[in-house]
Image (spheres, rainbow, N blue to C red):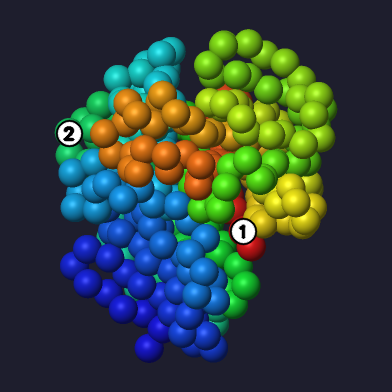
Amino acid sequence: MSIQETDSAVTLVHPENPNTSVTILKYGATVYSWKSNGKEKLWLSTSAKLDGTKAVRGGIPLVFPAFGKNTTDKYLKDLPQHGFARTSVWKCNGLVRSHPPTVQFELNESIADEKLIKLWPYKFTIKYNVELGSDHLKTYVDIFNDGQEAFDFNWLFHTYYKINNINDVYVCDLKDDSTHDNITGKDATELNSKVIIGEEVDRRYLNVKTVKPVHIMDAKSGTPLVTLIRSNLPDVVVWNPWIEKAKGMGDFDPKDGYQNMLCVEPGYIHGLATLKPCQKWSSYQYIY
Ligand code: BG6
């Protein structure tokens, strides 16, 4: 069987390669390990909480319905940073496809984080599929509005990549895109074809054409370490907390772990997406 399920997590193992697997915690439907041919591709803090007491620091936390701290929307502004999807326990619907093995998780208002869902009074269903290819991971989502009123939301895959050394990588394919720097608050245009991370970076790239894959490159060899393909996710956040911010995060360990991780997060965050009653919103990230 390519699926193993426990009370708290689900693991898929690729039928053709026992060294290729993905593990998803039901809490947050958070992918926290993806091994491709024996190599771990995602970064996970050694002090990440996997017991459902805090959003997982690492892997692929899901951000919904608010990205960051919303300050303007009637209901979203009452939610904590990054919403409630990552702190809700999702239902596992089991395998929905056997090849490539694909497992589905579901969240709706009746099972979402009890305290937080009271603050966001909508009826919805999210179906989240994790597909384990022999050479890729695809995470895709369908959000349904089951109520009588339209609602506004953000969606984002907060993907933490594991890398050997932050000094040896750069992100490319973002040149000429509009940016908003979350540290300085300034808007600008990306002038660099190679985005090097040499300090704290918390930058939103907005309306990046989805036909363009985004790459994390190995600076020495000039070859891609990660290729990110996006559907209906026009925005990309590049985040590395660097030294001081990492020190301040209780669940970020080891403290020099910022050297071995980089978040490249595709999402819909330049504004709020709107979902009318009976409609569906879909998107995916495909990474290899
Ligand atoms: C990023 C944001 O997506 O997530 C950062 O751009 C934020 O501003 C980071 O610090 C981590 O957020 P959290 O809530 O998981 O600590």
Residue at image coords 78%, 48%: 211
Image coords of residue 169 (percent x, y): 67, 45
Give the labeled residue for mark 2.
Answer: 115
Q: Nearer the viewer, residue 265 or 143?
A: 265
- The quadrant of the picture occupied by the C terminus is bottom right
Residue at image coords 52%, 85%: 17
Residue 140 seen in this snapshot: yes
Image coords of residue 122 (percent x, y): 33, 35
Question: Judging from the image, what secondary structure is the residue with disc 1 in?
Answer: strand
Counting every numbered tag in the picture gives 2
Circles 1 and 2, Cβ within 8 Å, touching? The answer is no
Q: Quadrant of residue 33?
A: bottom left
The residue carrying pointer 1 sits among few (fewer than 14), some (14 to 19) or many (20 or more) residues within 10 Å by Cα, namely some
Q: Nearer the viewer, mark 1 or mark 2?
A: 1
Q: Nearer the viewer, residue 93 or 132?
A: 132
Question: Is residue 258 shown left or right of residue 100?
Answer: left
Q: Quadrant of residue 113?
A: top left
Residue at image coords 32%, 69%: 10
Question: Is residue 38 shown left or right of residue 286?
Answer: left
